[in-house]
Image: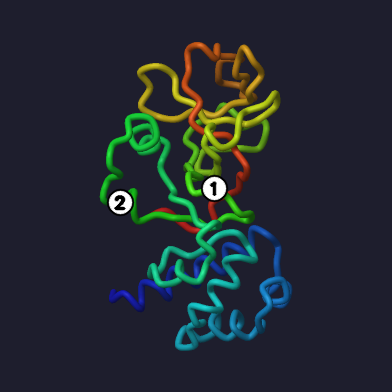
Amino acid sequence: MDDRERDVVQIRAWMRTVMDNRNWSAEHWARVAGTSPTNITRFLKDAMHVPSTQTIAKLSRACGSMPDIAQQVLSLVPADRVVPLYSAKDAVSVLLLEKAPSKTTGKKVISTMQAVSEGAFAVTASSRRMELRGIAPQDIVICEPVAVLKPRPGSVVLYAEEGSKVLEIGVYQAPYITHHSSDAPDVVALEDVTIVGVAVEARRRLTPEG
C-alpha cells in the first residue's frame, strides 16, 4: 500500500467514525465546516475524489480531530489549535523527565476545539480512575501545563505518582486528588504526586490506533 492509498483509507475511516460518533450527517458536518457536503459524500462513494487539504482542514476544525495523514494538513490548522499527542507512558518521559520524544511520539498531533498555549499537550488516557465521570482508557485528554493554568477545586488533572511510569487522572481537591472509579483508590495525597497538566478538553478517539 503506497502513501496515497494509506491516506485514503485513513480519511475514509476518520469520516465514518466522526459521523457515527457524533450522529452527524454529511450535510450537517459540511455546514458547520463551511464546505460542500459533496466533498464528503462523493469521497465516501468513490475514493478517486479525495478532498483537498484545505477541505480536510475545514472538516478537522469543525469536529476537533484530524485523520492520521500527511503532515501538510497541519499547515492549514492554526498553530494555537495543534498540540502533540503522547501516550500516558511517553508523557512521563517527555513532560516530567524531559527526555527527547521517541521516534513515534513526535509524529502524533491532534487539533483542539479552542486556542491553547504553546506548552499545551494531549495524552491518550490509560487509567480507569475517572471512568465514572466519563473519561475512559483511550480517550484523549488535552491539557494546559500548570505553569499556564493553575488547578482549582474540581479541576481534572493529569499527575504522576512517585516512581510511576504512566500518568494518572483525577480531580483536584486539595489536599487530595480524588477519583471516580469502582476499581481505584478513592484519593491520593497531593504531597505524593506531581501534577503535570490541567484538562481543558476530553473526547473519544476518532481515529483508530496504528
Q: Nearer the viewer, mark 1 or mark 2?
A: 1
Q: Secondary structure at mark 1?
A: loop
Q: Residues within 10 Å of mark 2 (few under 14, many from 20)?
A: few
Q: Residues within 10 Å of mark 1 (few under 14, many from 20)?
A: some
Picture quadrant where residue 144 is located? top right
Q: Residue at x 44, y 68 (%)?
A: 10
How far is mark 1 from mark 2, CA to CA?
23 Å
Q: Position of residue 67 (x, y in %)?
A: 48, 65
The amino acid type of the residue labelled 2 equals: Thr
| Depth order, front residue of 54/68 | 54
| Depth order, front residue of 62/22 | 62
Looking at the image, residue 33 lies above or below residue 22: below
Q: Position of residue 32 (x, y in %)?
A: 71, 71
Mark 1 highlights which residue?
A: 117
Q: Residue at x 53, y 82 (%)?
A: 43
Q: Secondary structure at mark 2?
A: loop
Q: Position of residue 17 (x, y in %)?
A: 57, 62
The image quadrant where one finds the C terminus is bottom left
The amino acid type of the residue labelled 1 equals: Ser
Looking at the image, residue 72 lies above or below residue 121: below
Residue 29 falls left or right of residue 159: right
Q: Give the total number of marks visible in the rendering.
A: 2
Mark toward the start of the polypeptide (1 vs 2): 2
Mark 2 highlights which residue?
A: 104
